[in-house]
């Protein structure tokens, strides 16, 4: 039986009821949850909430020899402008990831600078200003090289009989993402193909919308995520002929 492998962030992992004002009542399911029910396959999940793009690139490369012929790999992207730095934690004998926000700042907010100022790591407020400026102006363009690595790895796996797919969750802030035969294609409201999940509709309900603002969260609704899962299921069924 095929194993499906997921790489992504909270849009793949789901956030369950984390942050919910009514735990157990309001619950967020991802497209992955619905797709697993449709497929009934064993899964290996490498996604997690807030996981930076670069860590998914690393994990994909680390697992390159574990995928078997007939397996399915779905690699979901979102923000490519996370500046990820690594510092040693000498007393623990390991490395510490330092992730600078992937948000887009039209104007640098000094409250944001305070969030990332880290005297222990030698990161000054001036350093944070530089990092945020780099992330918002150039981070995505830097990450295009990493995305190219992902595309090359997924293409290589296809030649080995692994069914690999790339999924753009949303558009970037400043760059156009490359076209690829690996991409899932969705239908927008006009019936045109779009590689962007958030390109399906002009207006998409979020958790905040469906809870009338009670749960202030911008993740897409369960109903929308179930529809995405159905779309992916149809693509897989056609490609894999099951």
Image (tube, rainbow, N blue to C red):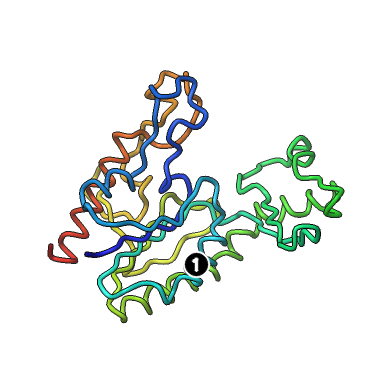
Residue 90 position by quadrant: bottom right
* Position of the C terminus by quadrant: bottom left
Q: Position of residue 169 (x, y in %)?
A: 41, 50
Q: Residue at x 27, y 48 (%)?
A: 35
Residue 156 position by quadrant: bottom left
* Position of the N terminus by quadrant: bottom left
Q: Is residue 188 left or right of residue 180?
A: left
Q: Residue at x 80, y 58 (%)?
A: 91
Q: Taking 158 as reference, is 113 above or below it? A: above
Q: Position of residue 89 (x, y in %)?
A: 77, 58
Q: Is residue 189 left or right of residue 20?
A: left
Q: Find numbered disc 1 in the image and state the secondary structure of the residue it sits on.
A: helix
Q: Which residue extends farthest left?
A: 242
Provide the residue designation for mark 1. Answer: 147
Q: Taking 179 as reference, is 112 above or below it? A: above
Nearest to the observer: residue 153 or residue 80: 153
Nearest to the observer: residue 133 or residue 89: 89
Nearest to the observer: residue 26 or residue 229: 26
Q: Position of residue 194 (x, y in %)?
A: 31, 54
Nearest to the observer: residue 33 or residue 220: 33
Q: Residue at x 58, y 59 (%)?
A: 140
Q: Residue at x 43, y 35 (%)?
A: 16
Q: Position of residue 112 (x, y in %)?
A: 73, 39
Q: Is residue 108 left or right of residue 219?
A: right
């Amino acid at each position: 039986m095929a194993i499906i492998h997921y790489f992504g962030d909270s849009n793949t992992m789901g956030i369950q009821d984390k942050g919910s004002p009514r735990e157990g009542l309001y619950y967020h399911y991802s497209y992955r949850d619905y797709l697993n029910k449709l497929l009934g396959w064993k899964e290996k999940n490498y996604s997690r909430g807030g996981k930076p793009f670069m860590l998914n690139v690393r994990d994909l490369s680390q697992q390159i020899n574990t995928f078997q012929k007939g397996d399915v790999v779905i690699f979901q992207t979102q923000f490519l402008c996370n500046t990820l730095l690594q510092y040693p934690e000498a007393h623990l004998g390991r490395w510490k990831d330092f992730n600078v926000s992937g948000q887009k700042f039209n104007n640098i907010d000094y409250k944001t600078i305070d969030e990332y100022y880290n005297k222990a790591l030698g990161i000054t407020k001036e350093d944070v200003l530089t990092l945020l400026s780099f992330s918002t102006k150039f981070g995505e363009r830097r990450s295009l090289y990493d995305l190219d690595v992902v595309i090359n790895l997924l293409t290589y796996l296809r030649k080995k009989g692994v069914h690999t797919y790339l999924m753009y969750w949303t558009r970037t802030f400043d760059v156009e993402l490359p076209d690829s035969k690996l991409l899932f294609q969705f239908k927008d409201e006009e019936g045109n193909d779009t590689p962007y999940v958030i390109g399906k509709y002009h207006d998409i309900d979020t958790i905040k919308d469906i809870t009338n603002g009670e749960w202030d969260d911008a993740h897409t609704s369960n109903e929308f995520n179930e529809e995405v899962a159905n779309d992916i299921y149809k693509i897989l069924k056609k490609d894999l002929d099951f």
